[in-house]
Amino acid sequence: MKIEYDNEFVCNNHSASNERADIFIAKAMNISRTKATDIIRERLAYKNEQVIDKSSTIILFGDTVKIAKPYKRKIKKKIDLNLKVIYENDDFIVIDKPPFISCHESNNMDSSYTIADWIIDNDIWKDELSDIERAGIVHRLDKNTSGVLLIAKSFKTQESLMDLFKNRKVKKQYDAITTGRIQQQGIIKYKITRNPLNPTKMTHSIGSGKDAETEYVLIKAYNKYNHVHFFPKTGRTHQIRVHTSAIGSPILGDEVYGAQSNLINRHALHASSIEFSLDGNKYNFRSEIPNDILNLIKK
């Protein structure tokens, strides 16, 4: 999503070079250092197009500093998504995301009601926003994927949780139904990159792309499909869907990386659990397998 800016400053004075970002912004905007710190904390300040996440960030001669406008949402009718809240405290909330709802807008033309809209409408997010994609969603589930979704309530918590994901300190389990043959267990390590022929899709790669790793265990093989547990070690876009397609066992009902199915009206992928530690506390949250998938594995 394109970010709009209120102010732009270029450090073209050697005397201002090597200053902290909060001091530079306070002087440039003629505001207090406290207000400048608030702007940085709310992630509205950018240095050379990259968000400034610390007041101590040094501004060098020639750097461009921009201050983003607080986010203004499109006018949308508030919808009661009837989401199940699994857990909530002062720092974050865990919900059971149903399928067919996007976490955020897919593009500027997207007017559908999203999880991010629900977060704002229910006053879950505490800080100012420069765009709706930052409304506390620290990891994303595809529109048709259901299950456990972790949402921060502030930038401070969001940064802490995102660090856990970045450093692979979050354990995730997915339940899925795949087609074709799959081994009893394994680890898929194909890299993932944007499909050059279709930028809305991802593809697997041996050479270029971002490292991706998915561990899996076959729970039960049925006549035409399999019940599999997946444990993604990384969090690339469409990772499980791309990896299963790459090994010839795509997710049932995945019309992007596999094929439609008359057994289910979405891809059969569910985020079953998430486990992590934050501020010395251990958390483990689970979501029950929804009926459209459960009915397949009960047969």
Image (cartoon, rainbow, N blue to C red):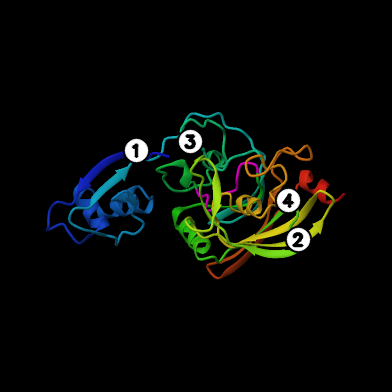
Counting residues from the start of the chain, the first of labels 1 and 4 encountered is 1
Secondary element at tag 2: strand
Q: Amino acid at mark 4?
A: Thr
Q: Amino acid at mark 1?
A: Glu
157 relative to 283 in the view: left or right: left
Q: Which residue is mark 4?
A: 178
Counting residues from the start of the chain, the first of labels 4 and 3 encountered is 3
Residue at 74 percent across and 62 percent down: it is 183
Q: Which residue is mark 1?
A: 4
Mark 1 residue crowding within 10 angstroms, few (<14) / some (14–19) / many (20+): some
**Mark 1 → mark 4, Cα distance in angstroms:** 43 Å
Secondary element at tag 4: strand
* Closer to the eye: label 3 or 2: 2
Residue 71: x percent and y percent? Answer: 41, 39
Magenta stretch in the rendered image: 136-144
Counting residues from the start of the chain, the first of labels 4 and 2 encountered is 4
Mark 3 residue crowding within 10 angstroms, few (<14) / some (14–19) / many (20+): few
The image shows residue 43, relative to residue 106, as above or below, that is below
Q: Which residue is mark 2?
A: 218
Residue 265 visible in this rendered orientation of the protein: yes
**Nearer to the camera, 165 or 217:** 217
